[in-house]
Amino acid sequence: MVIKKKSVSIVAPFYNEGEGVVLFWTAIREILDAMPAYDFEVICVDDGSRDDTLQKLISIAAQDRRFHVVELSRNFGKEAALTAGIDVAVGDAVIPIDADLQDPPELISEMLAEWDKGAEVVLARRMDRSTDTYMKRKTAELFYRFHNRLSHIKIPENVGDFRLMDRIAVDVLKQLPERQRFMKGLFAWVGFKTTTVDYKRSAREVGTTKFSGWKLWNFALEGITSFSTAPLKLMTYLGGTGTLITLFYALYIVFRTLIHGVDVPGYASLLVAILFVGSLQLIGIGILGEYVGRIYMETKQRPTYVVRKQHGVSRTFDHLASHDSHE
Ligand code: UDP
Ligand code: MG
Protein backbone atom coordinates (compact mmCIF):
# COMPACT_ATOMS: atom_id res chain seq x y z
CA MET A 1 0.00 0.00 0.00
CA VAL A 2 1.25 3.46 -0.85
CA ILE A 3 0.93 5.99 1.93
CA LYS A 4 -0.11 9.29 0.41
CA LYS A 5 2.33 12.07 1.20
CA LYS A 6 1.01 15.39 2.37
CA SER A 7 1.43 18.03 -0.30
CA VAL A 8 2.74 21.53 0.31
CA SER A 9 2.59 24.56 -1.99
CA ILE A 10 5.15 27.31 -1.63
CA VAL A 11 4.01 30.58 -3.19
CA ALA A 12 6.51 33.31 -4.05
CA PRO A 13 5.76 36.65 -5.77
CA PHE A 14 8.55 38.00 -8.02
CA TYR A 15 8.84 41.58 -9.21
CA ASN A 16 12.12 42.53 -10.87
CA GLU A 17 14.05 39.95 -8.84
CA GLY A 18 16.29 38.86 -11.77
CA GLU A 19 19.44 38.86 -9.67
CA GLY A 20 17.85 36.70 -7.01
CA VAL A 21 15.95 34.05 -8.95
CA VAL A 22 18.74 31.48 -9.07
CA LEU A 23 19.67 32.14 -5.43
CA PHE A 24 16.04 31.51 -4.51
CA TRP A 25 15.95 28.28 -6.48
CA THR A 26 19.19 27.02 -4.92
CA ALA A 27 18.06 27.82 -1.39
CA ILE A 28 14.55 26.38 -1.77
CA ARG A 29 15.74 23.27 -3.62
CA GLU A 30 18.16 22.43 -0.84
CA ILE A 31 15.44 22.74 1.79
CA LEU A 32 12.87 20.72 -0.15
CA ASP A 33 15.33 17.95 -0.98
CA ALA A 34 15.97 17.55 2.73
CA MET A 35 12.28 16.82 3.40
CA PRO A 36 11.28 13.80 1.31
CA ALA A 37 8.27 13.16 3.55
CA TYR A 38 6.23 15.79 1.69
CA ASP A 39 5.31 16.51 -1.91
CA PHE A 40 6.23 20.06 -2.79
CA GLU A 41 5.24 22.46 -5.51
CA VAL A 42 6.68 25.96 -5.80
CA ILE A 43 4.37 28.50 -7.43
CA CYS A 44 6.41 31.46 -8.66
CA VAL A 45 4.26 34.41 -9.66
CA ASP A 46 5.91 36.83 -12.03
CA ASP A 47 4.24 40.14 -11.21
CA GLY A 48 4.95 41.84 -14.54
CA SER A 49 8.72 42.08 -14.05
CA ARG A 50 10.55 44.24 -16.57
CA ASP A 51 13.89 42.47 -16.19
CA ASP A 52 14.81 38.85 -16.95
CA THR A 53 12.97 37.40 -13.93
CA LEU A 54 10.38 35.63 -16.08
CA GLN A 55 12.89 34.01 -18.47
CA LYS A 56 14.92 32.75 -15.55
CA LEU A 57 11.83 31.36 -13.80
CA ILE A 58 10.68 29.58 -16.95
CA SER A 59 14.07 27.96 -17.43
CA ILE A 60 14.03 26.78 -13.81
CA ALA A 61 10.54 25.33 -14.27
CA ALA A 62 11.86 23.41 -17.27
CA GLN A 63 14.60 21.83 -15.12
CA ASP A 64 12.77 21.30 -11.85
CA ARG A 65 9.30 19.82 -12.15
CA ARG A 66 8.30 21.14 -8.72
CA PHE A 67 8.52 24.72 -10.01
CA HIS A 68 5.57 26.37 -11.72
CA VAL A 69 5.37 29.87 -13.08
CA VAL A 70 2.25 32.01 -13.16
CA GLU A 71 2.85 34.92 -15.47
CA LEU A 72 0.69 37.98 -14.81
CA SER A 73 -0.14 40.34 -17.67
CA ARG A 74 1.39 43.37 -15.91
CA ASN A 75 2.50 44.51 -12.45
CA PHE A 76 -0.49 44.12 -10.13
CA GLY A 77 1.32 44.54 -6.80
CA LYS A 78 2.39 42.04 -4.19
CA GLU A 79 -1.06 41.47 -2.71
CA ALA A 80 -2.53 40.56 -6.10
CA ALA A 81 0.45 38.40 -7.03
CA LEU A 82 0.13 36.46 -3.77
CA THR A 83 -3.58 36.01 -4.40
CA ALA A 84 -2.86 34.65 -7.88
CA GLY A 85 -0.36 32.15 -6.47
CA ILE A 86 -2.66 31.02 -3.67
CA ASP A 87 -5.51 30.55 -6.16
CA VAL A 88 -3.35 28.28 -8.30
CA ALA A 89 -1.80 26.31 -5.40
CA VAL A 90 -3.27 22.87 -4.75
CA GLY A 91 -1.25 21.70 -1.72
CA ASP A 92 -2.73 20.51 1.58
CA ALA A 93 -0.86 23.49 3.03
CA VAL A 94 0.22 26.76 1.44
CA ILE A 95 3.27 28.79 2.44
CA PRO A 96 3.67 32.30 0.98
CA ILE A 97 7.29 33.41 1.02
CA ASP A 98 9.18 36.48 -0.27
CA ALA A 99 11.39 35.86 -3.28
CA ASP A 100 14.29 37.86 -1.84
CA LEU A 101 15.04 35.20 0.82
CA GLN A 102 14.29 37.65 3.63
CA ASP A 103 11.91 34.97 4.88
CA PRO A 104 14.37 32.15 5.69
CA PRO A 105 13.32 28.91 3.92
CA GLU A 106 14.99 26.94 6.75
CA LEU A 107 11.93 27.81 8.81
CA ILE A 108 9.68 25.75 6.54
CA SER A 109 10.59 22.50 8.29
CA GLU A 110 9.68 24.02 11.69
CA MET A 111 6.37 25.21 10.27
CA LEU A 112 5.62 21.78 8.86
CA ALA A 113 6.39 20.20 12.23
CA GLU A 114 3.84 22.48 13.90
CA TRP A 115 1.34 21.69 11.14
CA ASP A 116 1.84 17.97 11.69
CA LYS A 117 1.12 18.56 15.38
CA GLY A 118 -2.28 19.95 14.43
CA ALA A 119 -1.85 23.68 13.88
CA GLU A 120 -3.99 25.06 11.05
CA VAL A 121 -2.03 28.28 10.74
CA VAL A 122 1.65 28.69 11.66
CA LEU A 123 2.89 32.28 11.82
CA ALA A 124 6.53 33.20 11.40
CA ARG A 125 7.34 36.05 13.77
CA ARG A 126 10.38 38.26 13.35
CA MET A 127 12.33 38.33 16.58
CA ASP A 128 14.73 40.93 15.43
CA ARG A 129 14.22 43.56 12.75
CA SER A 130 17.58 45.21 13.18
CA THR A 131 18.20 44.82 9.45
CA ASP A 132 15.30 47.18 8.72
CA THR A 133 15.93 50.91 9.01
CA TYR A 134 14.96 52.72 12.22
CA MET A 135 12.23 54.60 10.34
CA LYS A 136 10.71 51.42 8.94
CA ARG A 137 10.67 49.73 12.35
CA LYS A 138 9.10 52.72 14.06
CA THR A 139 6.45 53.34 11.40
CA ALA A 140 5.60 49.64 11.30
CA GLU A 141 5.20 49.62 15.09
CA LEU A 142 2.97 52.69 14.92
CA PHE A 143 0.86 51.16 12.18
CA TYR A 144 0.24 47.95 14.13
CA ARG A 145 -0.63 49.84 17.28
CA PHE A 146 -2.99 52.20 15.46
CA HIS A 147 -4.60 49.48 13.35
CA ASN A 148 -5.16 47.10 16.23
CA ARG A 149 -6.62 49.87 18.38
CA LEU A 150 -9.16 50.71 15.66
CA SER A 151 -10.01 47.31 14.23
CA HIS A 152 -11.64 44.24 15.74
CA ILE A 153 -9.38 42.07 13.61
CA LYS A 154 -5.98 42.19 15.29
CA ILE A 155 -2.99 41.83 13.01
CA PRO A 156 -0.19 40.10 14.94
CA GLU A 157 2.81 42.40 15.27
CA ASN A 158 6.07 41.53 13.48
CA VAL A 159 4.38 38.89 11.38
CA GLY A 160 4.56 39.28 7.61
CA ASP A 161 2.98 37.20 4.90
CA PHE A 162 5.41 34.34 5.62
CA ARG A 163 3.30 31.66 7.30
CA LEU A 164 1.80 28.23 6.76
CA MET A 165 -1.90 27.83 6.12
CA ASP A 166 -3.75 24.55 6.08
CA ARG A 167 -6.05 23.91 3.10
CA ILE A 168 -9.03 24.50 5.41
CA ALA A 169 -7.91 28.12 5.97
CA VAL A 170 -6.84 28.65 2.35
CA ASP A 171 -10.27 27.66 1.07
CA VAL A 172 -11.93 30.22 3.33
CA LEU A 173 -9.44 32.87 2.24
CA LYS A 174 -10.23 32.14 -1.39
CA GLN A 175 -13.93 32.64 -0.75
CA LEU A 176 -13.51 36.21 0.49
CA PRO A 177 -14.91 38.21 -2.42
CA GLU A 178 -13.12 41.52 -2.05
CA ARG A 179 -10.94 42.68 -4.91
CA GLN A 180 -8.68 45.03 -2.95
CA ARG A 181 -6.80 42.50 -0.93
CA PHE A 182 -4.95 43.54 2.19
CA MET A 183 -3.54 40.07 2.75
CA LYS A 184 -2.22 40.50 6.29
CA GLY A 185 -5.70 41.52 7.39
CA LEU A 186 -7.47 38.80 5.42
CA PHE A 187 -5.10 36.16 6.80
CA ALA A 188 -5.95 37.34 10.32
CA TRP A 189 -9.67 37.53 9.58
CA VAL A 190 -9.77 33.85 8.60
CA GLY A 191 -8.76 32.71 12.11
CA PHE A 192 -8.22 28.99 12.87
CA LYS A 193 -5.90 27.26 15.33
CA THR A 194 -2.72 29.29 15.22
CA THR A 195 0.79 28.79 16.54
CA THR A 196 3.91 30.87 16.09
CA VAL A 197 7.54 30.15 15.31
CA ASP A 198 10.22 32.81 15.70
CA TYR A 199 13.00 33.82 13.36
CA LYS A 200 15.55 36.51 12.73
CA ARG A 201 14.91 38.62 9.64
CA SER A 202 18.00 38.93 7.50
CA ALA A 203 18.83 41.69 5.05
CA ARG A 204 18.01 41.40 1.36
CA GLU A 205 20.70 39.35 -0.43
CA VAL A 206 20.43 41.14 -3.76
CA GLY A 207 18.23 43.79 -5.36
CA THR A 208 16.37 46.55 -3.56
CA THR A 209 13.07 46.87 -1.72
CA LYS A 210 10.02 47.48 -3.92
CA PHE A 211 8.22 49.44 -1.23
CA SER A 212 8.93 53.16 -0.98
CA GLY A 213 7.72 55.26 1.93
CA TRP A 214 4.75 56.55 -0.06
CA LYS A 215 3.73 53.01 -1.10
CA LEU A 216 3.92 51.90 2.53
CA TRP A 217 1.79 54.87 3.62
CA ASN A 218 -0.91 53.93 1.11
CA PHE A 219 -0.59 50.31 2.18
CA ALA A 220 -1.25 51.37 5.78
CA LEU A 221 -4.30 53.41 4.70
CA GLU A 222 -5.56 50.39 2.77
CA GLY A 223 -5.15 48.23 5.87
CA ILE A 224 -7.00 50.57 8.18
CA THR A 225 -9.86 51.37 5.82
CA SER A 226 -10.26 47.70 4.86
CA PHE A 227 -10.81 46.57 8.40
CA SER A 228 -12.19 49.47 10.38
CA THR A 229 -14.76 52.23 10.08
CA ALA A 230 -13.47 53.92 13.23
CA PRO A 231 -12.10 56.98 11.34
CA LEU A 232 -15.65 57.68 10.13
CA LYS A 233 -16.98 57.46 13.67
CA LEU A 234 -14.17 59.65 14.90
CA MET A 235 -15.41 62.43 12.62
CA THR A 236 -18.89 62.16 14.11
CA TYR A 237 -17.52 62.50 17.63
CA LEU A 238 -15.25 65.38 16.68
CA GLY A 239 -18.23 67.10 15.09
CA GLY A 240 -20.30 66.46 18.20
CA THR A 241 -17.62 67.82 20.51
CA GLY A 242 -17.23 70.90 18.30
CA THR A 243 -20.96 71.53 18.40
CA LEU A 244 -21.03 71.36 22.20
CA ILE A 245 -18.11 73.73 22.58
CA THR A 246 -19.69 76.16 20.11
CA LEU A 247 -22.95 76.03 22.05
CA PHE A 248 -21.29 76.98 25.32
CA TYR A 249 -19.27 79.67 23.62
CA ALA A 250 -22.44 81.11 22.06
CA LEU A 251 -24.16 81.22 25.47
CA TYR A 252 -21.10 82.90 26.93
CA ILE A 253 -21.16 85.58 24.21
CA VAL A 254 -24.88 86.22 24.68
CA PHE A 255 -24.46 86.79 28.43
CA ARG A 256 -21.36 88.89 27.98
CA THR A 257 -23.16 91.07 25.45
CA LEU A 258 -26.11 91.48 27.85
CA ILE A 259 -23.82 92.55 30.66
CA HIS A 260 -21.10 94.54 28.91
CA GLY A 261 -22.88 95.60 25.72
CA VAL A 262 -21.80 94.97 22.11
CA ASP A 263 -18.19 93.97 21.72
CA VAL A 264 -16.78 94.84 18.26
CA PRO A 265 -13.21 93.48 18.30
CA GLY A 266 -12.83 89.74 17.80
CA TYR A 267 -11.42 89.51 14.31
CA ALA A 268 -8.67 87.08 15.29
CA SER A 269 -10.89 84.66 17.19
CA LEU A 270 -13.42 84.76 14.37
CA LEU A 271 -10.86 83.94 11.72
CA VAL A 272 -9.32 81.14 13.77
CA ALA A 273 -12.72 79.59 14.38
CA ILE A 274 -13.67 79.72 10.70
CA LEU A 275 -10.38 78.25 9.53
CA PHE A 276 -10.41 75.56 12.20
CA VAL A 277 -13.92 74.39 11.39
CA GLY A 278 -13.21 74.58 7.66
CA SER A 279 -10.13 72.39 7.96
CA LEU A 280 -11.97 69.91 10.13
CA GLN A 281 -14.63 69.65 7.44
CA LEU A 282 -12.05 69.09 4.74
CA ILE A 283 -10.37 66.33 6.76
CA GLY A 284 -13.77 64.77 7.31
CA ILE A 285 -14.52 64.84 3.59
CA GLY A 286 -11.08 63.36 2.92
CA ILE A 287 -11.71 60.44 5.27
CA LEU A 288 -15.12 59.92 3.69
CA GLY A 289 -13.42 60.02 0.30
CA GLU A 290 -11.03 57.22 1.28
CA TYR A 291 -14.00 54.98 1.96
CA VAL A 292 -16.11 56.10 -0.99
CA GLY A 293 -13.11 55.56 -3.29
CA ARG A 294 -12.75 52.02 -2.02
CA ILE A 295 -16.45 51.33 -2.47
CA TYR A 296 -16.09 52.66 -6.01
CA MET A 297 -13.15 50.37 -6.77
CA GLU A 298 -14.95 47.34 -5.32
CA THR A 299 -18.16 47.93 -7.25
CA LYS A 300 -16.29 47.80 -10.55
CA GLN A 301 -15.78 44.08 -9.85
CA ARG A 302 -12.60 43.97 -11.88
CA PRO A 303 -10.50 40.87 -11.27
CA THR A 304 -7.61 41.21 -8.81
CA TYR A 305 -5.08 40.00 -11.39
CA VAL A 306 -4.85 38.75 -14.96
CA VAL A 307 -2.81 35.66 -15.86
CA ARG A 308 -1.09 35.71 -19.25
CA LYS A 309 0.20 32.14 -19.11
CA GLN A 310 1.24 29.34 -16.78
CA HIS A 311 4.52 27.51 -17.27
CA GLY A 312 5.72 24.15 -15.97
CA VAL A 313 4.63 20.53 -16.11
CA SER A 314 1.04 19.87 -15.11
CA ARG A 315 0.68 19.47 -11.39
CA THR A 316 1.71 16.12 -9.97
CA PHE A 317 -0.41 15.97 -6.83
CA ASP A 318 -2.93 13.14 -6.97
CA HIS A 319 -6.07 15.10 -6.23
CA LEU A 320 -5.22 17.49 -9.06
CA ALA A 321 -4.65 14.64 -11.51
CA SER A 322 -8.23 13.48 -10.99
CA HIS A 323 -9.48 16.99 -11.88
CA ASP A 324 -7.39 17.11 -15.01
CA SER A 325 -8.84 13.90 -16.37
CA HIS A 326 -12.23 15.58 -16.84
CA GLU A 327 -10.81 18.16 -19.20
N1 UDP B 1 6.68 42.15 -5.00
C1 UDP B 1 5.74 41.85 -6.00
N2 UDP B 1 5.10 42.89 -6.64
C2 UDP B 1 5.33 44.21 -6.32
C3 UDP B 1 6.28 44.48 -5.29
C4 UDP B 1 6.92 43.43 -4.66
O1 UDP B 1 5.49 40.70 -6.30
O2 UDP B 1 4.73 45.08 -6.94
C5 UDP B 1 7.37 41.03 -4.33
C6 UDP B 1 8.89 41.12 -4.33
O3 UDP B 1 9.44 40.59 -5.53
C7 UDP B 1 9.27 40.30 -3.12
C8 UDP B 1 8.12 40.55 -2.16
O4 UDP B 1 7.04 41.05 -2.97
O5 UDP B 1 9.31 38.91 -3.40
C9 UDP B 1 8.49 41.53 -1.07
O6 UDP B 1 8.98 42.73 -1.64
P1 UDP B 1 10.18 43.54 -1.01
O7 UDP B 1 11.29 42.61 -0.61
O8 UDP B 1 10.56 44.62 -1.97
O9 UDP B 1 9.51 44.17 0.27
P2 UDP B 1 10.18 44.38 1.72
O10 UDP B 1 10.83 43.08 2.11
O11 UDP B 1 11.16 45.48 1.55
O12 UDP B 1 9.04 44.75 2.60
MG1 MG C 1 12.13 42.02 1.07
Image (cartoon, rainbow, N blue to C red):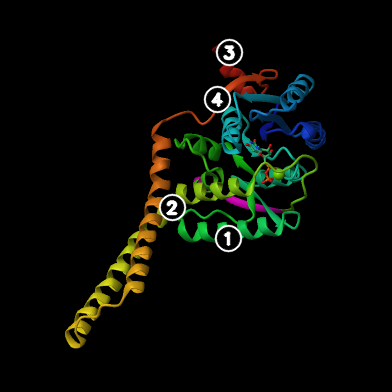
Q: Are marks 2 and 3 in contact (CB under 8 Å)?
A: no
- Sequence-wise, which precedes: disc 1 or disc 2? 1
Residue type, numbered disc 1 = Leu
Q: Which residue is rendered at x = 77% and y = 50% of the image?
A: 202
Q: Position of residue 273 (x, y in %)?
A: 34, 68
Nearer the observer: mark 1 or 2; the answer is 1
- Sequence-wise, which precedes: disc 1 or disc 3? 1
Instruction: Give the residue number, with chain letter if any, for mark 4.
Output: 306
Quadrant of picture, ligand 2: top right
User: Dividing the picture into quarters, in which one does residue 315 lie?
Assistant: top right
Mark 3 residue crowding within 10 angstroms, few (<14) / some (14–19) / many (20+): few
Spatial CA span between label 4 and label 3: 25 Å
Instruction: Give the residue number, with chain letter if any, for mark 2.
Output: 228
Residue type, numbered disc 2 = Ser
Spatial CA span between label 1 and label 4: 34 Å
Instruction: Give the residue number, with chain letter if any, for mark 1.
Output: 142
Would you place residue 147 above or below residue 321 in this image? below
Magenta range is 190-198
Q: Position of residue 39 (x, y in %)?
A: 71, 30
